[in-house]
């Protein structure tokens, strides 16, 4: 089947990309493994699944009318709310016909002679397309723990990212391995509902209150009145979370002021707020970080009545993972039906049919074992399919030393192919990061179309290897001094056994990313090769819109309204 553009994945990225390519007038098809749209939010439907970006910013910015009129009820969206919203967008914009559900892309190959991608799906469908955009999702490939005997468990074994639709855990003894964002959400939701809950924790994490609460009519009106100004600020911010991003060092103020500032953010709620709005150096200065650790540990001690449980819940590492917030997580450990096992003291020896055997001989008997053990983030989604670019090189080969992509979206040797939320994309509020990437990819495709028209040839748009290498190098350098490197989390890929850590994000954030992509667009895409293999430098940009100007202004530190 012939189309202009094939998009893979109908999550937030794939939906928006399909919309933008259709706007360009391209015949666009989007294939999706699931029976519906949603991506990560389709599969992660475990109890308590919630976005911890505030609702007013966990959506697309590009439909202004929808921003003001689409209803939501709470400060944060739960998974069903997000899925409903995504379906609403698809229907409102008449995109549904572009989707082919229950269709998994398994193989793709660049055909040099016709300058097309040949894309095979598990349904037997084969598509040929000029452009191939992968929006596979950064948190898609499930990470199951390697624990002896896991396959012998006699009860229900569930990964949170593949939650069965019809399961009732009411009378069950439930064990949860993993206590990241997902683990704390699912445990908080299940604790009051199940007979018994055991949390198996290898590294307890720091969590702060989310401040989840119903949204009042007045609050919504205020949000609506300020939406334009809010987004202006968001695009100019690092994290895109609508929070103050302060620069003050936690060590530059008195102990009393430090406590007061932490308390203020604790009371307001929100993980990113606590990490980035009290002080500006929590993630880079060990002393400041330790001050935050001390504050949160004191809160754990105050909240959890059983001193043994409280001790087991106190993290031993720095506060340097993706920050977490909750809706009463520490409080669940005050319930008699909730226990914690410190896996550093008593590791799991094996899983047995009736439960989990610890290395002290104790068997924790379970009816259900939940793995909230996360993802093989970003490249995991790509490593399970075969994508072959120029000269027979596969993406796996290209990423032999670790995954990389120029501006997070393009790989050398893979012409006309793009990734949404690929490696080294901006580390920021996800919908904003996605929009920025899709905006840039769309500009690339528009430029490729234009060049092809002028040259009366088939489009060929391929990033130069040097540009990809330089971007990776920049992303690497930006992590110097980051305390996030000290913890074994998915942010640097240290959660996957045997995987060499590699920088997975561009840590300068959203505004700087817009500036970088704006610079590339404005200069006429000098990092991308033309048909004859040489880089093309054009003086004028492609006129794709105000964001380029904004980006450049940002880069120079000039407000765009100036
Ligand atoms: P995360 O944040 O990667 O957390 C995974 C958790 O699973 C973490 O507590 C891990 O412990 C634990 N884990 C993984 N493997 C094991 C084994 N073998 N034994 C014991 N414990 C294990 O995944 P999430 O799904 O919570 O969140 C991912 C992102 O999704 C999140 O950051 C948001 O952006 C949304 P560890 O800490 O490695 O000791």
Image (spheres, helix red, strand yellow):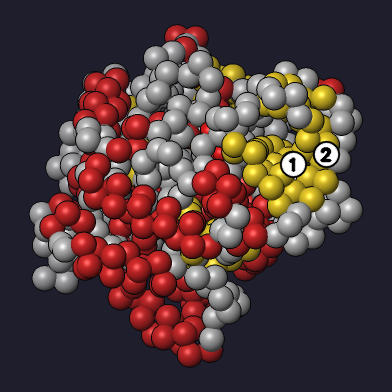
Vertical placement of residue 147 versus 50, above or below:
above
Q: Is mark 2 within 8 Å of ligand 1?
A: no
Residue beneath the point at 78% across and 45% down: 174
Left or right: residue 414 versus residue 543 is right
Left or right: residue 285 versus residue 76 is left
On the image, the x and y values in percent for residue 517 come to 27, 45
Left or right: residue 406 versus residue 59 is left
Report the front residue among 204 and 369: 204
Whether the residues at callouts 2 and 1 have beta carbons within 8 Å, the answer is yes
Q: Quadrant of the N terminus?
A: top right
Q: Is mark 1 within 8 Å of ligand 1?
A: no
Instruction: Say the numbered circle drawn on residue 175.
Output: 1
Vertical placement of residue 18 versus 351, above or below:
below
Q: Secondary structure at mark 2?
A: loop
Q: Which residue is mark 2?
A: 366
Extreme residue toward the bottom, this view: 218
Q: Quadrant of the C terminus?
A: bottom left
Report the front residue among 397 and 448: 397
Residue beneath the point at 53% across and 89% down: 217
């Amino acid at each position: 089947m012939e189309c202009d553009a094939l998009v893979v994945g109908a999550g937030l990225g794939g939906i928006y990309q399909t919309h933008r390519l259709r706007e360009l007038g391209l015949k666009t098809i989007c294939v999706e493994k699931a029976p519906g749209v949603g991506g990560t939010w389709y599969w992660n439907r475990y109890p308590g699944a919630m976005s911890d970006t505030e609702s007013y910013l966990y959506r697309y910015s590009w439909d202004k009318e929808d921003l003001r009129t689409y209803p939501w009820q709470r400060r944060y969206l739960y998974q069903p709310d997000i899925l409903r919203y995504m379906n609403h967008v698809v229907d409102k914009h008449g995109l549904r016909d572009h989707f082919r559900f229950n269709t998994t892309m398994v193989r793709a190959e660049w055909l040099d002679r016709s300058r097309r991608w040949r894309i095979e799906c598990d349904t037997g469908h084969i598509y040929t397309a000029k452009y191939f955009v992968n929006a596979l999702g950064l948190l898609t490939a499930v990470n199951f723990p390697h624990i002896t005997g896991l396959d012998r468990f006699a009860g229900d074994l569930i990964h949170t990212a593949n939650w069965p639709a019809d399961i009732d855990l009411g009378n069950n003894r439930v064990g949860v391995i993993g206590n990241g964002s997902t683990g704390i959400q699912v445990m908080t939701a299940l604790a009051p509902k199940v007979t018994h809950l055991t949390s198996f924790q290898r590294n307890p994490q720091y969590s702060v209150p989310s401040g989840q609460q119903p949204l009042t009519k007045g609050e919504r009106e205020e949000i609506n009145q300020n939406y334009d100004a809010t987004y202006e600020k968001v695009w100019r911010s690092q994290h895109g979370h609508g929070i103050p991003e302060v620069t003050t060092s936690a060590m530059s103020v008195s102990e009393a002021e430090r406590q007061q500032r932490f308390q203020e953010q604790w009371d307001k709620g929100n993980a990113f707020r606590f990490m980035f709005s009290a002080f500006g150096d929590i993630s880079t200065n060990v002393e400041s970080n330790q001050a935050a650790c001390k504050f949160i540990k004191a809160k754990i001690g105050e909240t959890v009545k059983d001193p043994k449980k409280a001790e087991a819940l106190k993290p031993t590492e720095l506060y340097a993972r993706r920050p977490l917030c909750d809706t009463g997580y520490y409080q669940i450990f005050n319930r008699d039906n909730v226990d914690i096992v410190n896996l550093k003291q008593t590791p799991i020896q094996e899983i047995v049919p009736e439960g989990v055997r610890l290395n002290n001989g104790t068997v924790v008997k379970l009816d259900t074992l939940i793995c909230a053990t996360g993802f093989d983030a970003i490249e995991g989604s790509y490593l399970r399919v075969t994508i072959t670019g120029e000269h027979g090189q596969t993406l796996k080969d290209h990423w032999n030393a670790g995954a990389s992509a120029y501006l997070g979206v393009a790989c050398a040797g893979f012409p006309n192919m793009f990734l949404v939320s690929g490696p080294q994309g901006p580390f920021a509020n996800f919908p904003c990061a996605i929009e920025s990437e899709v905006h840039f990819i769309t500009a690339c495709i528009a430029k490729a179309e234009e060049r092809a028209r002028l040259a009366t040839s088939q489009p060929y748009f391929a990033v130069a290897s040097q540009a990809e290498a330089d971007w990776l190098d920049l992303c690497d350098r930006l992590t110097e001094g980051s305390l996030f490197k000290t913890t074994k989390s998915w942010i640097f890929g240290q959660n996957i056994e045997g995987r060499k850590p590699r920088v997975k994000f561009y840590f300068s954030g959203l505004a700087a990313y817009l500036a970088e992509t704006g610079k590339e667009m404005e200069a006429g895409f000098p990092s991308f090769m033309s048909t004859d293999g040489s880089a093309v430098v054009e003086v004028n940009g492609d006129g794709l819109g105000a964001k380029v100007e904004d980006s450049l202004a940002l880069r120079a530190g000039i407000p765009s309204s100036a």
